[in-house]
Amino acid sequence: MTGVVNLAQKFAQFDDHWNPRLAGELNGQHVRLVKFQGAFPWHRHEHEDEMFLVVAGEFDMRFRDRTERVRAGEFIIVPRGTEHCPYAEREVHVLLFEPAGTVNTGNVIEARTRGAPERI
């Protein structure tokens, strides 16, 4: 896909939480959009780094030794192998940048585990 991507229009296409959508691909990487609220399971990705860019809202990225608040216009990179737990008190809109094939729940399989994301 080429051309301009309007994030507000893409986020308006879905309402559910913890279900990433594929908005673009480049060099074996996925650009995924996700809305979330509440807590996600503690997990890690053995082989993939992940970048979380907040488009709207804010969330806490919980690590075993600290918590980092990430606000609109900010991003955080979670290095591979690092156990983490995203948490948002209110709905947050996030752009994820990660290798294609990354499973959203990493080493944990549960009801919110998604394989190949739907393209929007």
Image: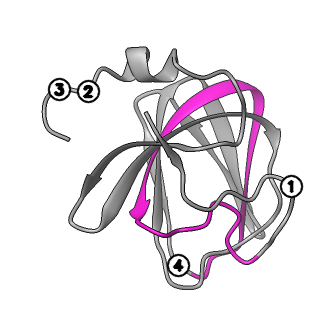
Q: Looking at the image, which is closer to me, 58 or 38?
A: 38
Residue matched to label 4 = 80
Is residue 65 placed above or below 80 in the rendered structure? above
Q: Residues within 10 Å of mark 2 (few under 14, many from 20)?
A: few
- Which label's residue is closer to the chain start, 2 or 1? 2
- Which label's residue is closer to the chain start, 3 or 1? 3
Q: Give the image quarter of residue 4.
A: top left
Residue matched to label 3 = 4
- Which label's residue is closer to the chain start, 4 or 3? 3
Q: Looking at the image, which is closer to me, 71 or 47?
A: 47
Q: Secondary structure at mark 3?
A: loop
Marks 1 and 4, how far apart in space? 23 Å
Q: Looking at the image, which is closer to me, 78 or 12?
A: 12
Residue range of the region highlighted in magenta in the rendering? 81-107
Identify the mark at residue 5; answer none if there is no mark: 2
Marks 4 and 3, how far apart in space? 30 Å
Q: Secondary structure at mark 4?
A: loop
Q: Residues within 10 Å of mark 1 (few under 14, many from 20)?
A: few
Identify the mark at residue 111; answer none if there is no mark: 1
- Which label's residue is closer to the chain start, 1 or 4? 4
Image spot of residue 81 (x, y percent):
60, 82
Task: Tell me which amino acid carries mark 2.
Answer: Val
- Image coloring type: one colour
Q: Residue at x 37, y 56 (%)?
A: 30
Marks 3 and 1, how far apart in space? 33 Å
Task: Tell me which amino acid carries mark 3.
Answer: Val
Side (left or right) of 86 relative to 76: right
Q: Residues within 10 Å of mark 3 (few under 14, many from 20)?
A: few
> Are the residues at dot 3 and dot 2 in contact (C-beta closer than 8 Å)?
yes
Is residue 60 placed above or below 98 in the rendered structure? above
Task: Tell me which amino acid carries mark 4.
Answer: Arg
